[in-house]
Image (cartoon, grey):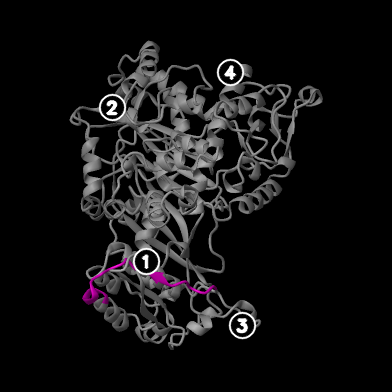
Amino acid sequence: MKLNRCVSSCLFSLLKPYSSYHWTTTMATTAKTFEGMKTVDEADVGISCFISQLPGFRGILKQRYADFIVNEVDIDGNVVRLTSLDLPPEMDVKEEDKTKSSENVPQNYVSAIESFRSISSVTDAERLETLINQVNLGTDDEISPIVLDPSSDKSKRTAIHNFVKENFKFLVTDTVDGPDATSKCIRVRVNSGANNNRDKRSRKRKERGDKPFDSRGSEHWPEHVGKFLRFHLYKENKDTQEALGLIGKMLGVQPKSFGFSGTKDRRSVSTQRVTVFKQQASKLAALNKRLFGIKVGDFCQVKEGLLLGQLMGNRFTITLRGVVADSEETIKKSAESLGKDGFINYFGLQRFGSGSVPTHHVGTALLKGEWKDAVDMILDPREKTGDIDGTLRQLPRYLVAERAILQCLKKCPGNYLQALKGIPRTLRMMYVHSYQSYLWNNAASLRIQKYGTSQVVLGDLVSTKVDAAKRMVESLTSEHKENNEEALDCDQLDDTAVVDLPAERSDLVKVVGIEDLEAGTYSTSDIVLPLPGSKVIYPSNGIAEIYHDLAKKDGISLTESIHGVKEFSITSMTGGYRRVFQKPIDFEWELLTYTDSNKPLAETDLDRITMEKPVDKVGSAEEIEDESMKADTNPPASCETDLKDQTDNKKDENDTENPNSEQTQLALKMALTLPSSCYATMAIRELLKTSTSVAYHKTLN
């Protein structure tokens, strides 16, 4: 995309000396700048090469979370946008119909559970909530009773007995011996004799005959209506699971009732598809008045829920603020190079976590069977205290892994493997996957250092030439078999889809031979590298050695397991493949000028809905077809109010406010589409030739 003469003259005065020497110095001193800070450096996880040799320039990534807009691209190639918050006429349920159907909807005991906290402990309330959710979900298996914390206060135990009897008719309580002679424990279990349809829920499938029954909802759902409500989730500065957790709490349903194709970055504005099982659209639409930084809309009933990986990719609208370069030509050439040649498809820093210990270090301990070390790394240093109950009360709920470990250690002190298995599988597998990513990044860097970026060489691993539609269907099936219930921790992910074990399977890749080189069958865009597993093949040109050398250095074998826990063993994983080079799709860019650092420079879905008129663009390169790139907008009053109501969001913005906001500054705005599992931050890295770490970009403000 070329800049016109008018824009060129306008921007010339903003371009400042930013020599390649300055860029080199910046990169060389980055590690020293962050020395002592708890952050992962790109070199530590194998990220070291670039495609182009062009000089970089300065630009601030995510100065505001609205500078990073993500719209999911569904499996049919449609960009997912929030277009309406209104309830479709066909879903507008009449009041009398709501009354008739209320008996069939699982009851919401949120208020009663909150009251229960006042006469018990936080841990007991959580146990009770879990039990009630199991009953509401109608699980096929027998529901195990819960045992509350021991107490020597008889009056307190009596109060709990009476409270359960009055508020939860489907539950019964009794008293069992405590850990010592002076205390007793209250046991709570489902009342199998109560008239609450529990008899239907507990029957095994074979006892129900051929009658269709889905344990996750009411048996009385109309047959002509799809069992899943699909909606578009719009969120600002929140990760996917955090947003759905809040919505689920308001609806009184568990998180597993929701389905989605992939997680989106927390520090962003994003829109994605979500499904929820047997819920009325009117209930979700009513939440919009109570939700801040979250909106739901575009409701429709569908027959199937969404599964992880059911997306083509993501459409990004990224604004880099505070751009400083040697010249306009430097920016132009860098942008054109990114569009033409793409970037190295590294796993970004987000993949390796934001905690005090990188996730691939935890993965190393798991693969070696060092369970205590793994637990220490996950808990280090904040949660390691002698007072587990006190720590749990203070620990934020979004720290799922830490809470799960502490709760298990409280019940089984010293059983570290059991504590690790207490972490939800979708989260605990992140650590091993992170180690696979670490090996892949290093292999990609070695491949580029040895053979460059411009040609396929003998022994390279490439994806074979097969029908694109066949590849999509087969790879999706393969991914779902391996990752049917995999969902990585949102705090560890940024702009990537959850299912990032890649597109190509073993039967769709091959090692390049002499005949392939002579025929010119393959190009650099076909080159792939494996993520280690039991069914992958490796390149035959020496690149495979780095996988085994790095693993051996860490005390790990990629061919045999040193312990019997399959889920923490690479040899028990199928593995996969990932493209080494990735080009952005439908890449567009433009340069803008601005004076107010707090003013949005890109239009969000919510902006469009509120019908606010955009302000005049200062530096448009040319007309852009994508609406997300048409104009800068003043933030809608309602949206701005919602955001300011969030204390953490307000603090977040103040922390990164530019002190020179009154001066005219330059911004580079881009729109690009990437396949799922590709990190947009790695495209930005190729453009700027600087670190993508959050800590580094904070120093630029």
Q: Earlier in the sequence, mark 3 or mark 2?
A: 3
Q: Tell me the residue at 46%/21% (across/down).
A: 333
Is residue 281 in sight in this rendering? no
Residue at mark 4: 449
Considering only order in the chain, which callout, 1 or 3, is on the residue closer to the N terminus? Answer: 1
Task: Classify mark 4: residues with Cα within 10 Å, few (<14), some (14-19) or many (20+).
Answer: few
**143 within the magenta span:** yes
Q: Are marks 3 and 1 in contact (CB under 8 Å)?
A: no
Helix, strand or loop under label 3: helix
Q: Secondary structure at mark 4?
A: helix
Q: CA distance from mark 4 to mark 2?
A: 30 Å
How far apart are labels 4 and 3 at the CA level?
63 Å
Q: Marks 1 and 2: CB-CB under 8 Å?
A: no
Tell me the SS state at disc 1: helix
Q: Is residue 160 left or right of residue 244?
A: left
Question: What secondary structure do most residues of the magenta stretch adopt?
Answer: loop
- Which label sits in the foreground, 3 or 1? 1
